[in-house]
Amino acid sequence: MNNVNDIEETDDFIADQRAWLLEHKAVTGLAWSQLTQPIGRKSSTLSLFGGGKYNGGPYAGGNGEIAKLIYRYRQTLNRQSELSLEAPDIPSFFETRTALDIMNLLSWAQTRGRICVWAGGAGTGKTEAAKEYAARASNVWHVEFDKSVNSISALCIAVLMAMRDFTPPIGAQKLSAYVANKLRDSQGLLILDEAQHLDIEQIEVVRSWYDRTGVGIALLGNESVISRMNGGVRKAEFAQLSSRVGLSDYRAQPLRDDVEAFAAAWNVQSEDILKFLHRIALQPGALRSATYTMEIAVMLARGENSELMLKHVQAAHMQRAKGAVAA
């Protein structure tokens, strides 16, 4: 990829970018408005430039500047096309033993109208299993939390967004009642993923939804989800909810069966690679780290026009370790 700052803004350069832009728009069927974000200029500016009628001047950004933005966009598309040939397709959802255990727990909670808790280490596949269950069963709402969901109103809005309801009332009390009304008699399941981010007030609201509606509720997260209710310093504060939990389970690391299912999804035939993947799966990040490693390893193998070998997986793992890639 070339640095556009080194390119002279000649008439020929500008004309070339204009011709490419018009051809690209015609071939892709994109509207000017759809090109605004990737190129970085308003649709009206791009339309004028494409018609040869734009003259923003040196301070507003003339034709040369617009041409350079288009050139950057061209280079980005070219590089993405090259990477698509080098990079492997990441396997879609595949059933691991852990995923099946999670989905069975979710099914039980929905069918019986119970609260369940599943806690697991990073990369054990809990979120993917929850998403898969939500894709298979009716009236299942999967909500992923982070620290930004820091109020009762934010909790309610996150749940309603998962329900595809974008016209809620205003005010925490009205929102909570509105959510409860939607959950009532639904025979559904509310999956609260990364539940370690919920505070005691939010947990109490979730408990009230359960008491008022009998809807199935699943709390997924890291080990603190269970420890907070079963033995943490604030155990008493969570007693109202923990006494209502029907089933809970914790899995710190993937099972051997999980890693073998992962290897099969990647079409790994080598026992040496399988053993190495087992080692990766026992480290922080687990199967997520193994996925990133395999993605790089396959690219390395394709770069050498070679079959995937242990050396490629080892090199990929080393490359990620040197780069301190977060799991």
Image (cartoon, helix red, strand yellow):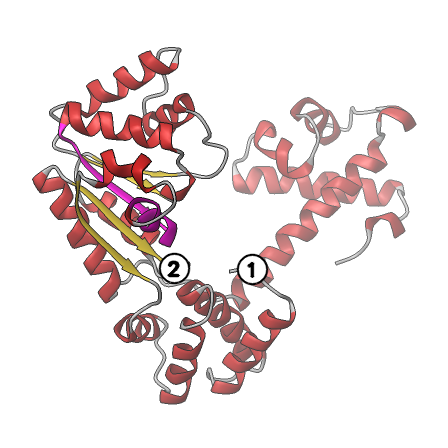
Secondary structure of the residue carrying numbered label 1: loop
The image quadrant where one finds the N terminus is bottom right
Q: Which residue is mark 2?
A: 121
Camera-nearest residue between 280 and 173: 173
Please say if 88 is above or below 300. above
Which amino acid, mark 2?
Gly
Please say if 204 is above or below 2. above
Q: Which picture quadrant has residue 96? A: bottom left
Q: Which residue is mark 1?
A: 326
User: Is residue 189 a member of the stretch shown in magenta?
Assistant: no
| Contact flag, marks 1 and 2 (Cβ < 8 Å) | no
Identified at 42% across, 66% down, the residue is 286
Please say if 110 is above or below 231. above
Identified at 50% across, 79% down, the residue is 313
Q: Where residue 281 sits: x, y (%)?
A: 41, 72
**Is 14 positioned to the left or the right of 168 in the image?**
right
Camera-nearest residue between 161 and 119: 119
Boundaries of the magenta span: 214-229
